[in-house]
Image: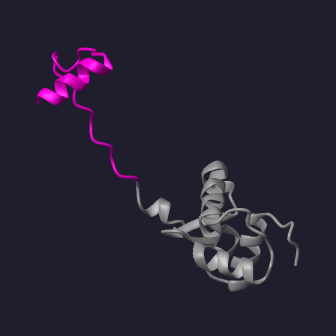
Amino acid sequence: MSENMSVRDAAEQVIRDAGTPLHAREITERILAQKLWEPQGKTPAATVSARLYSDIKKCGDKSRFVLTAAQTFGLRESGAKSSLAATPPPAKPAAKPLPPAAAAIYSFTDAAEKVKRA
């Protein structure tokens, strides 16, 4: 039990001990119960979730973590399957060009006057 353990190391230990993917809240509760990490902020579950998401984003297929469902993380080494691979990101709608009149540049005051008159 080390209070100096990183969030990622603590999460890895907790998920490995569970043997199954866990929701970020459950990971956090177990980390805190085992005193593996001492949070600095008021929302430790948000911190855990953010750190694991950022590890996955930064490291990609080399991350030790896999997002298996919304805010649910598993370990790649245990064969957890990523929900990201099965679900492509939603397509962004094409931007519509502005009509010529809307493309004009207004000062803040002029824009406020136009809105006020509308």
Q: Is residue 30 above or below residue 90?
A: below
- Verify whether residue 17 appears in magenta: no
Residue 23 in view (yes/no):
no
Residue 4 is drawn in which quadrant?
A: bottom right
- The quarter of the rendered structure image containing the C terminus is top left
Residue 39: x and y in percent read: 73, 67
Per the rendered image, the range of residues in magenta is: 89-118
Q: Looking at the image, which is closer to me, 93 or 99?
A: 99
Residue 66 is drawn in which quadrant?
A: bottom right
Residue 37: x and y in percent read: 79, 71
* Residue sitting at x 64%, y 66%: 42
* Residue sitting at x 24%, y 26%: 112
Q: Is residue 23 above or below residue 82?
A: below
* Residue sitting at x 78%, y 70%: 38
Residue 101 is drawn in which quadrant?
A: top left
Q: Is residue 85 above or below residue 74?
A: above
Magenta stretch: dominant SS? loop
